[in-house]
Every structure is written in structure tokens, then in C-alpha cells.
Amino acid sequence: FPKLYSVINELTNEAGMRMPVAFLAGNSKMFNAFASSTLAKSCSLIGLGEDLIKELSDDEIKCLIAHELGHIKKKHRLKKVFLPTLIILASLCVVGKCAFNLAKDGDGESSGEDERNAATLISVIVLNIIGHPFLNPLYSRHCEKEADIFAARLTKDPDSMISLFRLFDEVDSRDMDI
């Protein structure tokens, strides 16, 4: 573990980041590696699966850690929590305004404004129900790509990044958890 600490320390210094709390999870079937951060800049976390670390070369480990640091630096975990919340709150405001306008009019007569409010109300509800399952994977892929680019720039070692990708691809094709 001192060797991992040294790699994390080197990379965080080079990236101008604070040292995250790091831990190894033995025989983890829950994850290969992950990173998380909070609103407090001084509190971030990297978890590495011990089984995965055993499979990687030193250079691949460095790339993996740099990738996880990319998630912290780019605040991906926070954005994944806050963005959907903001979208839901904004949607609730629109729904509330439309519902209020529909209830306020309440004269029994249909107007163009009523139809627009009803259409907006239905659209917002449908987009929230249908849109989230499609947008979340797109955003997740964007975050992974951004962390990959961050890691490649930080390590300046594209060959080890490619090797790491190939290992993950091989594991996926074997349908085996590391």
C-alpha cells in the first residue's frame, strides 16, 4: 500500500489537487475502482479493488488512479447528484406554474392559454419520466471520457491507458468480475 500512496501523492501533486483518502477493498465484487468527493475540497475518496490492482502493471495502476482523480477534479459525483435534483426542481416549478394557471382560470371555458399550460405540464412530466433513463447513461459516458482524457494528460502515458482499456475490454468479454 505504501507504493499506491506514493503514486496517488505524485499524481495529486502534479494535478494540483489535495490528497484523497484512499483504500483497498479486498475481493470486492461491488466495484473495480471509484472516486467520490464532497462540497468540501479537502474531502475526497478513492477506492481500489484489490483483485483489480493485482491484475495491473505499475503503469496501468498509475493510469487507473489518474482516471479516478479525474472524476474528483471534474466533480463528476457531485454533478451526478445535483444536476438531476436541479432538473427535477425546475420541472416542479414549471408544473406548479402550469397547474396554478389551469386552476386559477377555472371558468370551464377552454382557452389557448389553458391548452398551452396543459401541453407544457404533460411535456415536462413525460420528459422527466422518459428522459432520465436516456440522459443518465449519456452523462455517465461523458464523465468517463472526460476522466480518461484527464488521466492521459496527467500520466502522459497513452500506451498504458490503452493497455488498461484492453484489460477492461477483455474482462468484459469474458463476462468475469475482477
Image (cartoon, helix red, strand yellow):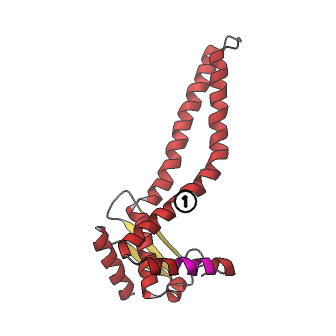
Q: Position of residue 68 (x, y in %)?
A: 44, 70
Label 1 amino acid?
Answer: Ser
Which is nearer the eye, 116 or 5?
116
Structural crowding at the residue carrying mark 1, measured as other residues with C-alpha within 10 Å and reported as few (<14), some (14–19) or many (≥20): some
Q: Position of residue 26 (x, y in %)?
A: 53, 84
Residue at 46% across / 59% down in the picture?
Answer: 76
Residue carrying label 1: 140
Please tell me whether mark 1 sits on a helix, a strand or a loop: helix
Residue 178, compared with residue 77, is above or below; it is below
Q: Position of residue 34 (x, y in %)?
A: 49, 71
Q: In which quadrant is the C terminus drawn?
A: bottom right
Residue 139 seen by the camera? yes
The residue segment tinted magenta is 164-170
Residue at 58% across / 23% down in the picture?
Answer: 100
Q: Is residue 175 left or right of residue 64?
A: right
Q: Main secondary structure of the magenta part?
A: helix
Please tell me whether residue 168 belongs to the stretch shown in magenta: yes
